[in-house]
Image (tube, helix red, strand yellow):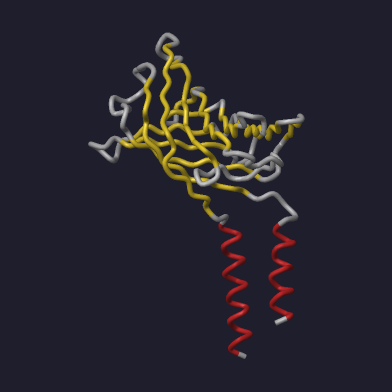
Amino acid sequence: MKKITFFIGFLCIVGNLSASLVKVEFEGVIDSVGSSSDLLPSYLTVGATYSGYYTYETIPDSLYESTNAKGYYYYSGQSGMYLEIVNPNNTDESLIIQTNPNDVDYSISISNSDKGDYYIKSKSNNINSQVLSPVLVFQCIFNDSVNDSLELRPATIEEYASNYLFVQGKDYSNELVDFNFGGVVTKTTVVPEPSIVSMVVIGTIGIIKRRKR
């Protein structure tokens, strides 16, 4: 029994020595489309469903701190957002907006003021592989006294009073036409990191082998 306890504790210590990637998947329904653009498909209407995910590394590239807020900033790596809206009449067709991996400008801002917010913002993104810059914002409103420490952790609908996704930007190929749309997030799921899952499996196998002996 002592050997098993030591083995699991060792895995936890090793896992904390370096940054890990956190991934949160989300789903929702569009409830506002503020303007139209040739860039946006006709099926992007109120009532359309969307899905996607956001990721962040537990150690940011830079950190801003004040009395009631913290800002975590990323300029490279795998941190970013991905949003997809599928054509309900043709599932092979979809609108995809995602962080530009060659120009990452991504941040997570957390506040514990009276109207505390959790903002995830990606400023440089691609639309269906075109290099454009609509801004993706994933906003959460705090429940009472949640995350007073301002620590970086996943924003889920179980923990926050409301979650909302908003996209705004310009179609620079169409005479600077503004477009924006958004929708309430209805589901969030924290996805385990593959390396963590592997370590758990390895630990389980080790325990089973000891028991068989």
Q: Position of residue 49 (x, y in %)?
A: 34, 36
Q: Position of residue 107 (x, y in %)?
A: 63, 32
Q: Residue at x 57, y 30 (%)?
A: 121
Q: Splitting the image into 4 quarters, where does residue 147 fall? A: top right
Q: Position of residue 188 (x, y in %)?
A: 47, 45
- How many marks on residues? 0
Residue nearest the viewer, comparing 111 with 200 = 111
Image height of 6 relative to 133, above or below = below
Residue lying at the far bottom of the rendered structure: 213
Looking at the image, residue 92 sits to the left or right of residue 213; the answer is left
Residue nearest the viewer, comparing 100 with 194 = 194
Residue 75 appears in the picture as rendered: no
Q: Splitting the image into 4 quarters, where does residue 114 fall? A: top right
Q: Residue at x 71, y 41 (%)?
A: 149
Quadrant showing the N terminus: bottom right
Residue nearest the viewer, comparing 128 with 34 = 34
Residue 63 appears in the picture as rendered: yes
Quadrant showing the C terminus: bottom right
Q: Residue at x 37, y 35 (%)?
A: 29
Q: Position of residue 56 (x, y in %)?
A: 61, 42
Residue nearest the viewer, comparing 84 with 67 = 67
Looking at the image, residue 90 sits to the left or right of residue 85; the answer is left
Residue lying at the far left of the rendered structure: 89
Image height of 191 relative to 103, above or below = below
Q: Residue at x 62, y 79 (%)?
A: 207
Looking at the image, residue 163 sits to the left or right of residue 91; the answer is right
Residue lying at the far top of the rendered structure: 175
